[in-house]
Amino acid sequence: MATGQKCRAFLKWAGGKYNLVQAISAHLPDSSVLIEPFVGAGSVFLNTDYPRYHLNDINADLIGLYQLLKTEHSRFIADARSLFSAQTNQRDAYLQLRQQFNQSSDNYERALLFLYLNRHGYNGLCRYNLSGKFNVPFGSYKKPYFPEAELLFFAEKAQKAEFSCVSYQDVMLQAKAGDVIYCDPPYVPLSKTASFTSYASQGFDLNDQAQLANLAEQAQNRGVAVVVSNHDTTWTRKIYQQAVLHSVQVGRSISQKG
């Protein structure tokens, strides 16, 4: 259930689905609602046309940003614009603002700084240490892009969305017959080092992968349409042996431009 012209997310994101939107949408049936337990940067949300959306992610900073854009987009965009300047595009300034983010408990301030860190940090990575502190180094971009048009588009479309920050298990179990779920979890790594699971302070291990597959099968049995993206490996083929599989060739990277 794709839209016409493709729209980019305003965040840079590991595993973003902008280049795969058409392939994914071809497998998403019509429904009154699309549910995403792992919304990430929201490329599928932005490039489909459902009457309603339930968008969830375990990353509280991400969901806090989305909720503010839905309710206070004019103020937020104006304030965020001031963080994109020559003065803030320096390593010392970045490290100071990163520390400010890690010390802040104010939702509005954290949302502003989360956008700043995403566009000024190395490769747009979102990574936290074991203490829950954001620890991505400075990206050294010539002039980081301020995604004003993309923010406005997201804010407008967010009026059709409900956001939550709960476990993927809770979201999957709440789905009812006739709903459509698209799952884009942290992928099964192709090697021991190739993994982006620390986008929240919690990880996502092989037990989670197996549990997600079980929940997807249970939801399908309740009359929910479920589509899941993952790496094509022996492990994923085993845990999704009851599913209909479609393979897609894709290059995986995060934009190295600001």
Image (cartoon, rainbow, N blue to C red):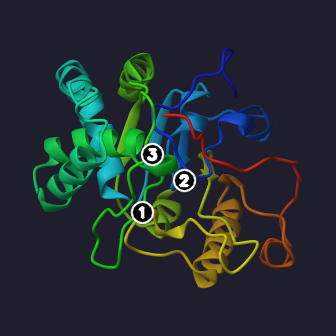
Which of discs 3 and 2 lies nearer the camera? The answer is 3
Residue drawn at (53%, 49%) of the image:
36
Left or right of 131, for residue 15: right
**Residue nearest the observer in this picture, 140 or 171:** 140
Q: Which residue is mark 1?
A: 127
Q: Position of residue 18 (x, y in %)?
A: 65, 35
What is the distance, in whole Å, between disc 3 and disc 1 at their CAs? 21 Å
Q: Position of residue 78 (x, y in %)?
A: 20, 20
Observer able to see residue 29:
no
What is the distance, in whole Å, between disc 1 and disc 2 at their CAs? 33 Å
Residue 60 sits above or below residue 240 on the image? above
For label 1, the SS is loop
Observer able to see residue 169:
yes
Quarter of the view holding residue 33? top right
**Residue nearest the observer in this picture, 202 or 114:** 114
Q: Which label's residue is closer to the chain start, 3 or 1?
A: 3
Q: Which label's residue is closer to the chain start, 1 or 2?
A: 1
Residue drawn at (61%, 50%) of the image:
181
Left or right of 101, for residue 225: right
Q: Amino acid at mark 1?
A: Arg
**Residue nearest the observer in this picture, 105 or 96:** 96
Which of discs 3 and 1 lies nearer the camera? The answer is 1
Q: Which residue is mark 3?
A: 55
- Badge 2: residue crowd in 10 Å (few <14, some 14–19, many ≥20): some
Using the image, tell me which numbered label, if any, was put on residue 176. Answer: 2
Q: Which label's residue is closer to the chain start, 3 or 2?
A: 3
